[in-house]
Amino acid sequence: MARARLWIKVLAQAAVLGLAIAFVVILVRPELLRPPAPAIVDAPKPAVSPAGPLAGGTPSYAAAVERASAAVVNINTAKVVAVRPHPFFDDPLFREFFGRDNRDLLGPGQRVERSLGSGVITSPEGYVLTNYHVIRGADAIQVSLQDGRTVSARVVGSDPDTDLAVLKIDLKPLPVISVGHSEKLRVGDVVLAIGNPFGVGQTVTMGIVSATGRSRLGISTFENFIQTDAAINPGNSGGALVDVEGNLIGINTAIFSKSGGYQGVGFAIPTSIAQNVLDQIIRHGRPLRGWLGIEAQPLRPDVAEALGLESTAGVVVVAVVRNGPAHRAGIQPGDVIRTIDGREIADARQALLAISGREPGSRVRIGIVREGRTLTLEATAIERPPAAGAS
């Protein structure tokens, strides 16, 4: 009996000791009593195609930028300008104090004006397309590539009427941009502007096509701008406007701004114009444009009614240059031009672009309405005279 009580006492003490140990473990290391957690393995991140959507559904345009950006260059120009001497610099005391050798640096003579812009390499031969206003009057032009190479450039030719210029650089090998079809653009298409704003280095901004066919802006003679809200700032001029595949569809040219900075309204010259000017300058050193010698105005509803027309489609001829191509073809004031080479003409801008786009010597078919009759006349375009106001 005594032995039984002894074993009960030992077991009770062991139980109390076990409970005490368990209590301490629960307080100090509770994780020892939990079941083992499953191993956590980082799932592989989904591969992101540069031109495709990200995981969240947001598209990436990295592939388009990579395809186009290497062919977009920075342009630095220097122009020597005359400065009017200030009498202060001729003061003997001033020259004695600052030194006679500093006179050319501080006083009369010349100074250097520098400006920044952008351009686009369009061929392996080194032709660079940019804005005319970027290089206008420049005495020295330097082109800097994305890969760090810098080289002097010469002007092949320029066209103030479209604000375009072509430069030539002697470097090999060269990245070349792919040229797209600006005429296929639709309002709402995403576009990317690539350039060198404020000289900070190559920068890419994104926006959409806000409008096409913008004109009457007073920027150039032949206006058919792409309007975009992609940020375009000083230094972007001459840079690339590309589509989501990295194809060049415009040359960034101007902004509408009351402050001089970006306000959401930028303009680019479409490649439908820029490519033609580029080709002409490379071949001839200048653009060769067709001219017929007519002045046309929009066909207002009251004019259409007076002429007995049911539609305002087309333009009305208000003047014809005597002995010019149109005059020799039989076109008269009061004729309504409906088509040029089979294409419908909606306004005077379209008529100007259609005629100027023909090379001198080419035959132009003009569909007109005269006194209720529909006629087709043919005229031979000649080279557009300098500063010609008519088509």
Image: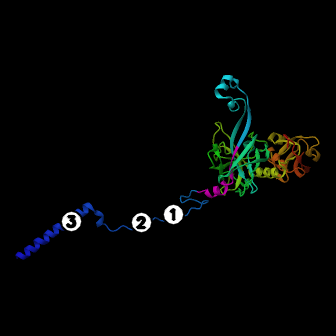
Left or right: 86, with 9 as reference point: right
User: Is residue 72 shown in magenta?
Assistant: yes
In the rendering, which numbered label is found on residue 21?
Answer: 3
Disc 2 packing (10 Å; few <14; some 14–19; many ≥20): few
Spatial separation of the CA atoms under disc 2 and disc 3: 32 Å
**Which residue is labeled 1 in the image?**
45
Q: Earlier in the sequence, mark 2 or mark 3?
A: 3
Q: Residue furthest left?
A: 2
Spatial separation of the CA atoms under disc 3 and disc 1: 46 Å
Of 32 and 99, the residue lying toward us: 99
Is residue 316 visible to the viewer in this orientation of the structure? Answer: yes
In the rendering, which numbered label is found on residue 40?
Answer: 2
Q: Secondary structure at mark 2?
A: loop
Which residue is depicted at the point 16% across and 70% down? 14
- Is there a contact, CB below 8 Å, between mark 2 and mark 3? no
Q: Secondary structure at mark 1?
A: loop
Magenta span? 59-76
- Residue 142 in percent (x, y) is at 71, 46
- Residue 34 in percent (x, y) is at 31, 66
Q: Earlier in the sequence, mark 2 or mark 1?
A: 2
Of 386 and 211, the residue lying toward us: 386
Left or right: 157, with 261 as reference point: right
Instruction: Identify the image quadrant of residue 264.
Output: top right
Instruction: Identify the image quadrant of residue 48.
Output: bottom right
Could you tell me the amino acid type at mark 3? Ile
Could you tell me the amino acid type at mark 1? Lys
